[in-house]
Image (cartoon, rainbow, N blue to C red):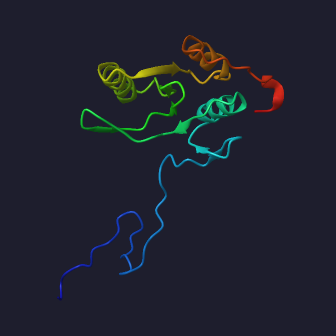
């Protein structure tokens, strides 16, 4: 074995310890707690979840779906209305735009009701959300934005 260099973890420059599980940070982990207790990934999603919760609209956060052989996790699903909500906040990234186009096409082809809310990060998302939900018979009352959220 002389002359062989041990394999190294390039990130830390260390050899992994056999049998020891390393804690790995996951990107975009759902850590923001909503009023309903559900943890979400972004402040936009928190505002959406809080608005739904405050208006007694039941929802599922990121349910796993299989469409056209691909896995999708829409941001929200409202089972009482058979409606999916996608909050689009990274529209400045070309890959993200293409992914949204693909989702829209697949949702439509699959006959799913979905709203895509484009948000540029300026202000709160509640008003846009309320306007998008209205055609589906979902009435929402928006709390005063001056409550510190």
Indicate the quadrant containing the C terminus: top left, top right, bottom left or bottom right. top right
10 to the left or right of 130:
left
Pick the front one: 66 or 119? 66
Indicate the quadrant containing the N terminus: top left, top right, bottom left or bottom right. bottom left
Number of labelled discs?
Answer: 0
| Residue at the image position 60 percent from the left and 34 percent from the top | 58
125 to the left or right of 23:
right
Residue 93: quadrant of the picture:
top left
Work out which residue is located at the far front of the displayed protein and give it: 80
| Residue at the image position 68 percent from the left and 42 percent from the top | 36
Pick the front one: 149 or 66? 66
Residue 132: percent from left, percent from top: 56, 15
69 to the left or right of 104:
left
Q: In the figure, 1 relative to 137: above or below?
A: below
Residue 102: percent from left, percent from top: 32, 24
11 to the left or right of 143:
left
Q: In the figure, 95 relative to 142: above or below?
A: below
Residue 44: percent from left, percent from top: 60, 31
Q: In the figure, 29 relative to 124: above or below?
A: below
| Residue at the image position 24 percent from the left and 79 percent from the top | 5
Work out which residue is located at the far bottom of the displayed protein and give it: 2
Residue 148: percent from left, percent from top: 80, 32
Pick the front one: 71 or 55? 55
């Amino acid at each position: 074995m002389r002359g062989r260099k041990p394999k190294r973890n390039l990130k830390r420059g260390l050899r992994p310890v056999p049998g020891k599980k390393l804690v790995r940070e996951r990107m975009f982990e759902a850590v923001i707690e909503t009023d309903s207790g559900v943890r979400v990934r972004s402040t936009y999603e928190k505002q959406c979840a809080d608005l739904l919760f405050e208006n007694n609209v039941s929802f599922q956060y990121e349910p796993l779906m299989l469409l056209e052989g691909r896995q999708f996790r829409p941001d929200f699903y409202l089972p009482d209305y058979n409606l999916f909500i996608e909050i689009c906040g990274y529209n400045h990234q070309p890959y993200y735009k293409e992914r949204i186009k693909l989702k829209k096409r697949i949702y439509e082809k699959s006959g799913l009701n979905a709203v895509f809310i484009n948000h540029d990060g300026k202000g709160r998302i509640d008003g846009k959300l309320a306007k998008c939900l209205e055609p589906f018979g979902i009435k929402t009352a928006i709390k005063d934005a001056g409550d510190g959220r």
